[in-house]
Image (tube, rainbow, N blue to C red):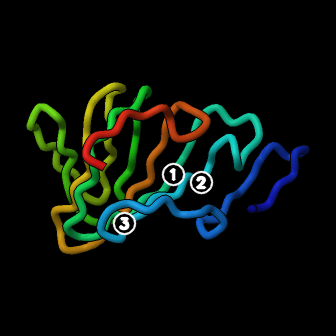
Amino acid sequence: MGAVDKDVGARTVALEDVAPIPLPNGSWSRMLLTGDTVEGIVSSLGYSVFTPGTVTGMVSHEVEEVAFVTAGRGELRMDDGVAVPFAAGQAVHIAPHRWHAVANTGDDDVVMIFGFPHPGYPPTERRGQ
């Protein structure tokens, strides 16, 4: 794991030090800052790569999700049929208990940094996975 000094009150966690969570079509996520990597943390931070053509299964988190898109473009597909487009340089907010899927609609990888007000990946319902 990254550099740690409890007296300093700061920690780093390298992307390569956290195991990937496989997603469809060769895509993946990594939960970087969680209760497993930072003692006492109350929120979490992750990093995802969605390859072109990827559409994830629908999920609904118990808490809100925030994200920042660093590369690519795509859309959030909501369960009411609404598609919310996003692109590099945009922040995304998803309210708690809202069913959504991530779709990469472009030709390049979508890279997204995301977080939750929860010390890990929050309790989540899943459809179609």
Mark 3 — residue? 27
Task: Give the alpha-carbon distance from disc 1 to disc 3, as whole Å.
Answer: 14 Å
Return the x and y of residue 25 as percentages of the image width and height.
Answer: 30, 68
Q: Disc 1 marks which amino acid?
A: Gly
Residue at the spot 75% in from the left edge and 52% down from the top edge:
11
Classify residue 43 by image quadrant: top right
Helix, strand or loop at label 1? It is: strand
Q: Of circles 3 and 2, which is in front?
A: 3
Q: Earlier in the sequence, mark 2 or mark 1?
A: 2
The residue wearing badge 2 is 32
**How far is disc 3 from disc 2 in space, using C-alphas?**
16 Å
Amino acid of disc 2: Leu
Q: Is residue 122 above or below residue 8?
A: above
In the image shown, does 67 or 98 lie closer to the viewer?
Answer: 98
Identify residue type, mark 3. Answer: Ser
Question: Quick one: label 3, few (<14), some, or many (20+) residues within 10 Å?
Answer: some
Q: Which of labels 1 and 3 is toward the front?
A: 3
Q: Say if residue 46 shows up in the picture.
A: yes
> Quadrant of the rendered structure where residue 64 is?
top left
Q: Secondary structure at mark 2?
A: strand
> Would you call the spot at circle 2 few (<14 residues within 10 Å), some (14-19), or many (20 or more)?
many
Marked residue nearer the N-terminal end (1 or 3): 3
